Image: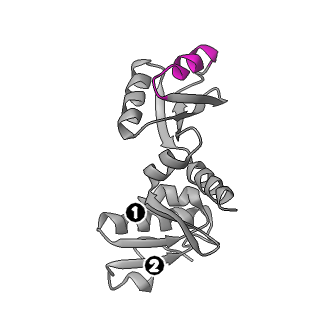
Amino acid sequence: MNCSLSLKPSALLNDPEIVLLDEPTSGLDPRGMSEVREMVKDLKKRKRLIFISSHLLSEVMDVCDEAALIDHGRLIVYDTIQNLTSRFSSGGSVLEVGFAGPRMNDRVVETIRKIRGVTSVELLDDQNLRFKFLGNAETQADILSELGALRIGVNSLRASSSALADVYLSLIEENV
């Protein structure tokens, strides 16, 4: 299936206000998955209401603003992605940070660990780390400002792709 933006599926020809997608990237190769994600993002820019059913929670985090987590047909929780990950993640929100060139060492990790709000730091390799923090978007902005002030070559930042999956797993464990 080729879902390039120039060849929209027939369901989108009438430019609907509401779009329902069930596992939209299932069975696609990486290029097809990327094209579908770009189509969804384009629909969002055009202010369309999009419902996506997906087991790929990293994909949900990439394209959605809100999520309803469901277990065995029962709604567990519905909220914004940011609120879900900050309210229900053990230890708070999780961010992954990339650095230009090999920069990570124990001294830098300890410095980041001491930033107000940071609860843990995990070194992924010499160019990437993951950290958890307690707080809201304002806390996140403060932490990012402090990271920039350290002048350690931050070149990428994203919410951990596993954060929503971690929330889901912790919530269904509570309900078992």
> Looking at the picture, how far across and down is residue 53, in whole percent?
54, 72
In magenta, the rendered stretch is 105-117
| Quadrant (top left/top right/bottom left/bottom right) for the C terminus | bottom right
Q: How many marks?
A: 2
Looking at the rendered structure, the secondary structure element under dot 2 is strand
Q: Image quadrant of residue 126?
A: top right
**Which residue type does callout 2 highlight?**
Leu
Front in this rendered view, residue 87 or 146:
87
Q: Determine which residue is flagged by label 2.
A: 20
Magenta stretch contains residue 123 = no
Residue shown at 36% from the left, 84% from the top: 13
Residue 3 visible (yes or no):
yes
Say few, some or many: other residues with alpha carbon within 10 Å of mark 2 (under 14 / 14 to 19 / 20 or more).
Answer: few
Residue 64 visible (yes or no):
no
Residue shown at 37% from the left, 29% from the top: 142
Point out which mark residue 153 bears: none
Answer left or right for 32 relative to 126: left
Q: How is the image coloured?
A: one colour
Point out which mark residue 41 bears: 1
Q: Image quadrant of residue 71?
A: bottom right
Front in this rendered view, residue 117 or 102:
117
In the rendered image, the vertical position of residue 49 relative to residue 80, given as above or below: below
Front in this rendered view, residue 99 or 94:
94
Residue shown at 48% from the left, 55% from the top: 62
**Which residue type does callout 1 highlight?**
Lys
